[in-house]
Image: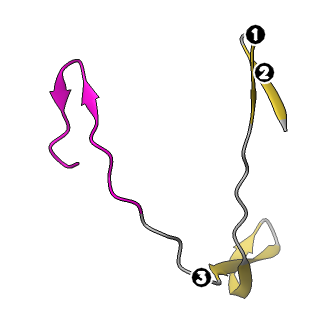
Amino acid sequence: MKLSFRGVKYESHLSTLETTEGETGGIYRGSPWKTHRLKQNPRRTAPKKITYRGVTDKRG
């Protein structure tokens, strides 16, 4: 999908995840809504080190 923000054009990269429909989670405005669960666990990536104005985040 081609998008534009403040005159800069870019292309979005959408990711898709396979899910299974679960049980009814509740009722919202008179309509039931269902929970969804991932079929596979997503890959975890290592946290990135973030620096803001010369200060490094201690969590990463």
What main secondary structure does the magenta stretch of the protein show?
A: loop
Label 3 – label 2 distance at C-alpha: 33 Å
**10 Å neighbourhood of mark 1: few (<14), some, or many (≥20)?**
few
Q: Are marks 3 and 2 in contact (CB under 8 Å)?
A: no
Residue kind at label 2, given as amino acid type: Ser
Identify the residue at image location x=43%, y=66%.
44
Quadrant in which residue 28 is drawn = bottom right
**10 Å neighbourhood of mark 2: few (<14), some, or many (≥20)?**
few
Residue bearing mark 1? 7
Residue kind at label 3, given as amino acid type: Gln
Question: Residue 13: x and y, percent?
Answer: 72, 45
Identify the residue at image location x=70%, y=57%.
15
- Earlier in the chain: of badge 1 and badge 3, it is 1
What numbered label is drawn on residue 4?
Answer: 2
What is the secondary structure assignment of the residue under circle 1? loop
Residue kind at label 1, given as amino acid type: Gly
Question: Residue 39: x and y, percent?
Answer: 65, 84
Question: Residue 56: x and y, percent?
Answer: 18, 33
Label 1 – label 2 distance at C-alpha: 6 Å
Q: Are marks 1 and 3 in contact (CB under 8 Å)?
A: no
Q: Which residues are magenta?
A: 45-60
What is the secondary structure assignment of the residue under circle 3? loop
Task: Indicate yes or no whether the magenta region holds residue 52.
Answer: yes
**10 Å neighbourhood of mark 3: few (<14), some, or many (≥20)?**
few
Label 1 – label 3 distance at C-alpha: 38 Å
Q: Are marks 1 and 2 in contact (CB under 8 Å)?
A: yes
In the image, is 7 to the left or to the right of 2?
A: left
Q: Is residue 52 above or below residue 30?
A: above
Residue bearing mark 3? 40
Q: Nearer the viewer, residue 19 or 45?
A: 45
- Earlier in the chain: of badge 3 and badge 2, it is 2
